[in-house]
Image: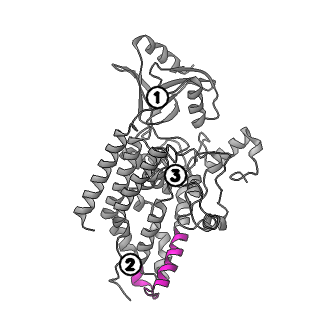
């Protein structure tokens, strides 16, 4: 197959499928229904660390998970979730909330939308005890 | 000895079929409200990974081709080009695929290339296209060497590899539940391959087959899909990015970072590259065997059941 035709097919195919998916409403992000959903998302990735306390962000996109082995986060990633302990990560305040940077090329960072009143509490909770 | 043998580049010709099949699967899921899930950014990443795989083949394909042609020059054997020989080549190349795929899950150097195929938390036809950009650097072309040395022309071997890849496209779906028993017994199917994409402890490191599931049954790596345990797709530690560059290179970067840690012996540095994924010098991570053992500690009743025997 000539390279030009292959290129048109590939670029057109990718663009077309992406537009169709978006128009079908399939770009919606996952939201935690409640603390139990956050617990499930956490244990799905880190089954050896039982949550002792869970705090959901107001937009229900992120959950702060407290465990006896240290704090962690579970957050919305597309239609699914990702979870990580926060030990060794860097946190900073942003215009909309907090940014947590993991030392991991496959999971570089997550942004948490939080009102100003909640930010300090989350930062304190994320610090290792 | 024939040197100018050519076969069609079947994977390229299959691109319109891939696009049509994705649209049909998507329509089925949307209309029937069952048979799988799609998410825009996940699908876009998978499709870009597929395009990158084709591009890397165009850019780096000459390395494997040069290697195979060099072997073709030295082998005294030439099995010819009859359809019987093509069929035999297809079966033996599928056996080759089984072992390359098994190495891909058990040797971190090879996993670094293959991991991106498993990095989606979805299982649909776009996942099939989430292919590696770095396959050349695993040197797994060596596993194809015996076929060329046995007298299968390199063009025929690559043609059969292309057919193998196309076969595997349609099994990346939840829209097909089970196929007739005889087919499930011999061939790789959506059900068998769903298990392979599972991150459940039960489903780790099994069902490596490309076309014929008989290889897994022969070599003891077959686990049937369990009605009692739904497959959870993705990686043991799922990625928190849709960036195709990060998806393609994250494990290579991880190998480099681990090997460069201070105070390691030369053996430990080497093991970070070639030991099974999850190996660490300080036991701070878990291999799939250790994940299974941890699961059995939490769920002892699962001992002896499929995936834990």
Q: Which of the 4 image quadrants contains residue B185?
A: bottom right
Q: Badge 1, how many Cα within 10 Å: few under 14, some, many 20+?
A: some
Q: Which labelled disc corresponds to residue B175?
A: 3
Residue B128 vertical placement versus A20 (above, below) = below
Query: Which residues fall within the magenta stretch?
Result: B70-96
Of residue B155 and residue A104, the one placed in the foreground of this image is B155
**Residue that badge 2 annotates:** B70
In magenta segment, residue B89: yes
Marked residue chain, label 3: B
Residue B118 lies, in percent from the top left, at 49, 50
In magenta segment, residue B76: yes
Marks 1, 3: nearer the viewer:
3
Marked residue chain, label 2: B
Residue B142 lies, in percent from the top left, at 47, 70
Q: CA distance from mark 3 to mark 2?
A: 44 Å
Provide the secondary structure element on which disc 3 rests: loop
Q: Quadrant of the C terminus of chain B?
A: bottom right
Q: CA distance from mark 1 to mark 3?
A: 40 Å
Residue B71 vertical placement versus B184 (above, below) = below
Q: Which of the 4 image quadrants contains residue B208?
A: bottom right
Q: Of all residues shown, which one is farthest toward the top? A: A117
**Residue that badge 1 annotates:** A89
């Amino acid at each position: 197959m000539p390279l030009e035709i292959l290129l048109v097919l590939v670029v057109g195919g990718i663009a077309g499928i992406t537009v169709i998916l978006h128009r079908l409403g399939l770009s919606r992000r996952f939201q935690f229904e409640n603390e139990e959903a956050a617990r499930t998302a956490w244990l799905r990735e880190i089954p050896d660390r039982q949550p002792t306390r869970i705090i959901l962000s107001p937009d229900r996109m992120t959950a702060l998970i407290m465990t006896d082995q240290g704090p962690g986060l579970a957050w919305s990633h597309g239609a699914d979730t990702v979870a990580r302990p926060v030990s060794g990560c860097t946190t900073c305040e942003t215009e909309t909330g907090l940014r947590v940077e993991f030392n991991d090329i496959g999971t570089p960072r997550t942004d948490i939308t939080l009102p100003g009143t909640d930010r300090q509490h989350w930062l304190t909770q994320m610090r290792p005890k | 000895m024939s040197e100018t043998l050519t076969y069609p580049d079947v994977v390229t010709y299959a691109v319109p079929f891939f696009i049509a099949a994705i649209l049909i699967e998507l329509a089925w899921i949307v209309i029937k409200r069952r048979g799988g899930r799609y998410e825009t950014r996940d699908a876009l990443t998978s499709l870009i990974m597929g395009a990158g795989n084709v591009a890397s083949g165009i850019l780096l394909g000459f390395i494997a081709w040069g290697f195979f042609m060099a072997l073709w020059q030295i082998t005294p054997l030439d099995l010819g080009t009859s359809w019987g020989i093509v069929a035999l080549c297809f079966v033996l190349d599928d056996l080759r695929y089984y072992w390359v795929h098994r190495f891909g899950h058990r040797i971190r150097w090879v996993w670094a290339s293959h991991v991106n195929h498993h990095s989606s938390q979805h299982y649909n036809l776009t996942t099939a296209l989430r292919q590696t950009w770095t396959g050349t650097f695993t040197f797994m072309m060596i596993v194809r060497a015996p076929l060329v040395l046995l007298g299968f022309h390199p063009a025929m071997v690559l043609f059969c590899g292309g057919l193998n890849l196309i076969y595997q496209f349609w099994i990346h779906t939840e829209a097909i539940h089970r196929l007739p028993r005889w087919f499930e017994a011999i061939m790789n199917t959506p059900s068998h391959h769903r298990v392979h994409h599972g991150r459940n402890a039960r489903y780790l490191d099994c069902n490596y087959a490309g076309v014929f599931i008989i290889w897994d049954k022969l070599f003891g790596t077959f686990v049937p899909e369990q009605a009692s345990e739904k497959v959870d797709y993705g990686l043991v530690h799922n990625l928190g990015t849709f960036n195709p560059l990060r998806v393609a290179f994250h494990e290579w970067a991880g190998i480099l970072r681990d090997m460069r840690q201070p105070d390691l012996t030369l053996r430990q540095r080497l093991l970070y590259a070639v030991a099974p994924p999850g190996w660490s010098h300080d036991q701070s991570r878990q291999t799939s065997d250790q994940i299974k053992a941890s699961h059995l500690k939490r769920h002892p009743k699962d001992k002896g059941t499929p995936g834990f025997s």
